[in-house]
Image: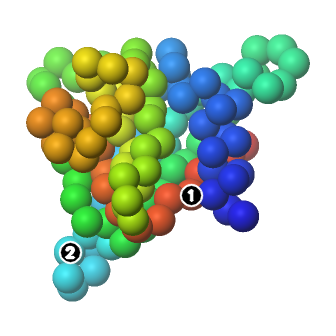
């Protein structure tokens, strides 16, 4: 049920294209990263008018995190935020550029992605 809402948010926000990355927060437990919360600022295309909102995407049961940012990092989303399913895991990829629109495998994400989280659960909610 919650996943349907998450997928709906990704559709309504057109994968957050032309939005901005507000924050990338890792929540730790003794065993490592438990969850990652990504906050984005983007336009909800399903609403009339130019309505911009903040959306939080939380990936739980985190298995892998990669965040490479250059010194001149710009927080603008150009290639979108992808919600991907590979077997029993979810992958949220921020602004990755791939040969195809969506990477076909986790290996492709690992090879070419610069900012992604792989975990067992994912949830997106509007904050305002």
Q: Quadrant of the N terminus?
A: bottom right
Tell which circle, 2 or 1, labels the residue nearer the N-terminal end: 2
State the residue in front, 82 or 85.
85
State the count of labels: 2
Neighbours of disc 1 within 10 Å: few (<14), some (14-19), many (20+): some
Q: Residue 75's quadrant in the figure?
A: top left
Neighbours of disc 2 within 10 Å: few (<14), some (14-19), many (20+): few
Q: Is label 1 in a helix, a strand or a loop?
A: strand
**Residue at screen point 20% across, 36% down:** 108
State the residue in front, 127 or 45.
45
**Residue at screen point 50% across, 59% down:** 122
Q: In this view, does 3 lie above or below 23?
A: below
In screen coordinates, is 64 left or right of 102?
left
**Residue at screen point 63% across, 57% down:** 3
The answer to whether residue 4 of the structure is visible from this angle is yes
Q: Is residue 72 above or below residue 84?
A: above
Report the mark closest to the observer, 2 or 1. 1
Q: Which residue was labeled with disc 2?
A: 32
Q: Which residue was labeled with disc 1?
A: 123
**Inter-mark Cα distance, 2 to 1:** 20 Å
Residue 32 location (% of width, % of height)? 20, 74
In screen coordinates, is 74 left or right of 17?
left
**Residue at screen point 54% across, 27% down:** 16
Residue 128 location (% of width, % of height)? 72, 43
Residue farthest to the bottom? 30
Evaluate if marks 2 and 1 touch, with contact meaning CB atoms under 8 Å apart.
no
- Numbered badge on residue 96: none
Q: Residue 107's quadrant in the figure?
A: top left
């Amino acid at each position: 049920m919650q996943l349907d809402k998450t997928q709906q948010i990704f559709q309504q926000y057109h994968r957050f294209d032309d939005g901005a990355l507000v924050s990338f927060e890792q929540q730790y437990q003794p065993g490592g990263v438990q969850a990652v919360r990504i906050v984005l600022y983007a336009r909800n295309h399903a609403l009339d008018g130019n309505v911009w909102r903040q959306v939080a995407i939380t990936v739980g049961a985190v298995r892998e995190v990669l965040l490479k940012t250059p010194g001149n990092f710009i927080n603008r989303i150009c290639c979108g935020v992808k919600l991907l399913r590979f077997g029993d895991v979810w992958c949220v990829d921020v602004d990755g550029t791939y040969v195809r629109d969506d990477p076909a495998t986790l290996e492709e994400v690992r090879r070419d992605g610069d900012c992604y989280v792989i975990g067992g659960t994912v949830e997106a909610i509007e904050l305002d």
